[in-house]
Image (cartoon, coloured by chain):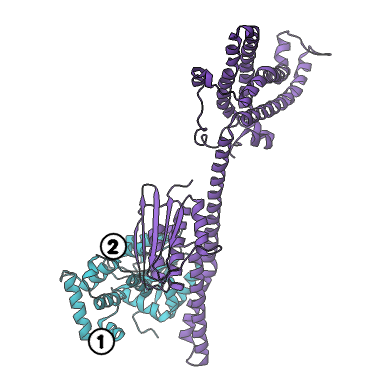
Chain colours: A purple, B cyan
């Protein structure tokens, strides 16, 4: 079982998983560093505000007070890094945040100093409330359960342990205290994790520019779209396997039996019927094969795009020349998109455009796959909502690819796609 | 009522249903199936041990369900050059065909789609031809290859009619049968075949008919 991907997921999972993961310790580290940083910030704020206000009459105070946003920028930069401790990105931060202003640049350009409300607010929060809360929380979480758990040792060392009205003096009492100690320790780790998660989330909300959050959301959406395409592909492949191992095999067996029957049954009506049944079984098999080819062709899985497109070309009713320079295997969704593009284009060429021949071309340049199908038919193809080409366009868009259809009335029709060979 | 010599056959097919069907057809034709097995290892073992006339094998078999049967066939042709091998495939894949034809061995070799087996007489006929040392390729595969035109290939020097004749040769037809199909005299077919040999510059000391077909199939 994989450890939970972030602190919130860890909190939602079972206690064992939480405790076995690194999250409680990361949370403690976050809180501890928070308390320390907050202490320093509190001191600096106190100095800046105090000295600034005192010297305000001398105008120097303005400059001193201007140090607050600077301090805030510094704290914010640090926090953006630090909050990864408990809220790591699923991937490295998507692109860099738009034009980050290095704090030493701000120092040099005091006149153009931009005061960021959220940054100052967060800094004040850290320097006043948060560090106190964190320091107290850490103390409570570590010391109380710590002392209880260590009570047997402390008692043996003759250090009396006292909790309000309770005194632990004998080893038996000390051992009994270990149980609530452990319970409190677990509860404490939970509380620490929760506190750190809440605090880091607040910091992220205040400090991460909206664009960065949007970029992360977009990246996530794209990823989930590809996952969806992938899931469809997996499902199609499962259906194909079921059909291949099931119905298709039974039909082949049936044609064999009927073929044998033809040899046994004497000439006459009976034989005619058997022959008819044989032909029907073969039609059923051919139709099933065509369906399977439209779902998820086996040859594509086994031999890749070039072999599968060759088979398509062979099965198509018109002469199709194939010039595909795709030597290596590509990710399954990419291969499938290209394959179904060729399938759709060839079907349209025969069925709607009355083409007499077609040509399939394709190659991989760098990390882009380009495939084009050109026919000599009547043209007039278009991407219509709900149509086969529209489905292809959607499929390609999910892969960051692109579909292009040129089909003037009178032809020729050309359908082209480009698509990255790596998944988004 | 077998109108041919009974053959000793080792059969490999992992789907029990199809194995039974093939078995019934072969036995109905009077052939002796020495062993019917479900994977490539058993095929190799039984063939080495029993020295059959013909091996019939499915391409995809356990454990990986990719091309075990094909690799076993190639290995068997290497070990027993006189062995005839008939390979059954669920679908057309040139990669299989090229691999199969590139294997060494003097015995006949065949590549048929599984659907063909239902046409019992044709299937048994193909089997006899493979056992007789011929190269037999499924008509549907050949049709597909004919459908495809490869510019600048070595076969580009052939005329349309010669390509047609070559295609029929690739199906394993005799000159007489080709003549009937194309509605021409057998002498005309012989002339075309001679032209094909000359244009493809085939070495007269080898079986040029086979070489021509191989050239044809490899290009396609």
Say whether mark 2 and mark 1 are on the same chain. yes
> Residue pushed farthest bottom?
A268
Q: Tell me where residue A376 appears, x and y as whole percent.
A: 37, 70
Residue drawn at the location 51% of the way across and 28% of the way down: A100
In this picture, residue B120 sits left or right of residue A192: left
Give me the disc on residue A337: none
Quadrant in the rendering for residue A303: bottom left
Q: Which quadrant of the view contains residue A30?
A: top right
Please provide percent x and percent y for residue B161.
25, 78
Q: Which residue is identified by label 1?
A: B184
* Left or right of A43 in this view: B217: left
Residue B102, label in figure: 2
Q: Earlier in the sequence, mark 1 or mark 2?
A: 2
**Which of these two is toward me, A33 or B122?**
A33
Q: Is residue B45 visible?
A: no
* Cα distance in 3D space between marks 1 and 2: 33 Å
Q: Is residue A222 above or below residue A95?
A: below
Q: Chain ID for label 1?
A: B
């Amino acid at each position: 079982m994989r450890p939970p991907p972030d602190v919130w997921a860890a909190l939602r999972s079972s206690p064992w998983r939480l405790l076995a993961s690194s999250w409680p310790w990361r949370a403690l580290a976050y809180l501890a560093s928070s308390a320390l940083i907050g202490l320093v910030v509190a001191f600096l704020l106190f100095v800046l505000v105090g000295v600034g206000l005192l010297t305000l009459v001398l105008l120097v105070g303005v400059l001193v007070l201007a140090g607050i946003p600077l301090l805030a920028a510094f704290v914010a930069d640090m926090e953006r890094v630090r909050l990864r401790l408990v809220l790591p990105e699923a991937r490295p931060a998507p692109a860099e945040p738009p034009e980050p202003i290095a704090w030493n640049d701000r120092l040099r350009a005091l006149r153009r100093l931009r005061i960021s409300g959220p940054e100052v607010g967060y800094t004040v929060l850290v320097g006043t409330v948060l560090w106190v809360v964190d320091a107290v929380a850490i103390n409570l979480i570590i010391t109380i359960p710590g002392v209880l758990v260590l009570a047997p040792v402390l008692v043996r060392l003759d250090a009396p342990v006292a909790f309000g009205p309770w005194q632990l003096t004998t080893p038996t009492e000390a051992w009994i205290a270990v149980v609530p100690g452990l319970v409190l320790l677990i509860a404490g780790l939970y509380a620490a994790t929760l506190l750190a998660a809440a605090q880091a989330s607040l910091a992220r909300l205040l400090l991460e520019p909206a664009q960065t959050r949007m970029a992360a959301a977009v990246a996530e959406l794209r990823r989930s779209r590809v996952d969806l395409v992938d899931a469809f592909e997996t499902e199609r492949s499962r259906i194909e396997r079921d059909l291949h191992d099931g119905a298709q095999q039974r039909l082949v067996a049936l044609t064999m039996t009927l073929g044998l029957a033809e040899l046994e049954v004497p000439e006459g009506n009976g034989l005619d019927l058997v022959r008819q049944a044989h032909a029907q079984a073969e039609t059923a098999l051919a139709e099933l094969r065509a369906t399977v080819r439209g779902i998820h062709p086996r040859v594509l899985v086994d031999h890749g795009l070039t072999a599968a497109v060759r088979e398509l070309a062979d099965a198509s009713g018109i002469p199709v020349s194939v010039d595909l320079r795709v030597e290596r295997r590509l990710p399954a969704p990419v291969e499938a998109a290209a394959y179904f593009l060729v399938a759709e284009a060839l079907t349209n060429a025969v069925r709607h455009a009355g083409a007499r021949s077609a040509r399939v071309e394709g190659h991989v340049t760098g990390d882009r796959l380009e495939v084009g199908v050109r026919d000599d038919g009547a043209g007039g193809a278009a991407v219509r909502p709900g149509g086969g080409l529209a489905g292809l366009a959607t499929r390609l868009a999910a892969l960051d690819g692109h579909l292009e259809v040129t089909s003037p009335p009178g032809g020729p029709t050309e359908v082209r796609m480009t698509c990255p060979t790596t998944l988004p | 009522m077998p109108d041919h010599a009974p053959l000793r056959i080792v059969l490999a097919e992992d789907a029990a249903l199809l194995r039974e069907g093939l078995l019934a057809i072969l036995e109905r034709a009077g052939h002796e199936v020495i062993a019917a097995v479900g994977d490539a290892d058993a095929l190799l073992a039984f063939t080495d041990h029993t020295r059959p006339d013909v091996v019939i094998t499915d391409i995809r078999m356990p454990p990986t369900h990719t091309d075990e049967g094909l690799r076993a066939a190639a290995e068997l042709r290497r070990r027993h050059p006189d062995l005839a091998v008939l390979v059954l495939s669920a679908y057309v894949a040139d990669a299989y065909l090229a691999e199969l034809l590139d294997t060494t061995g003097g015995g006949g070799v065949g590549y048929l789609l599984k659907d063909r087996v239902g046409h019992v007489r044709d299937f048994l006929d193909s089997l006899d031809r493979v056992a007789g040392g011929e190269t037999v390729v499924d008509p549907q595969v050949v049709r597909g290859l004919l459908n495809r035109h490869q510019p600048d290939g070595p076969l580009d020097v052939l005329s349309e009619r010669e390509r047609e004749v070559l295609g029929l040769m690739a199906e394993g037809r005799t000159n007489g049968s080709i003549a009937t199909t194309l509605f021409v005299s057998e002498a005309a077919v012989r002339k075309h075949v001679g032209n094909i040999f000359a244009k493809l510059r085939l070495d007269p000391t080898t079986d040029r008919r086979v070489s021509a077909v191989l050239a044809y199939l490899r290009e396609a």
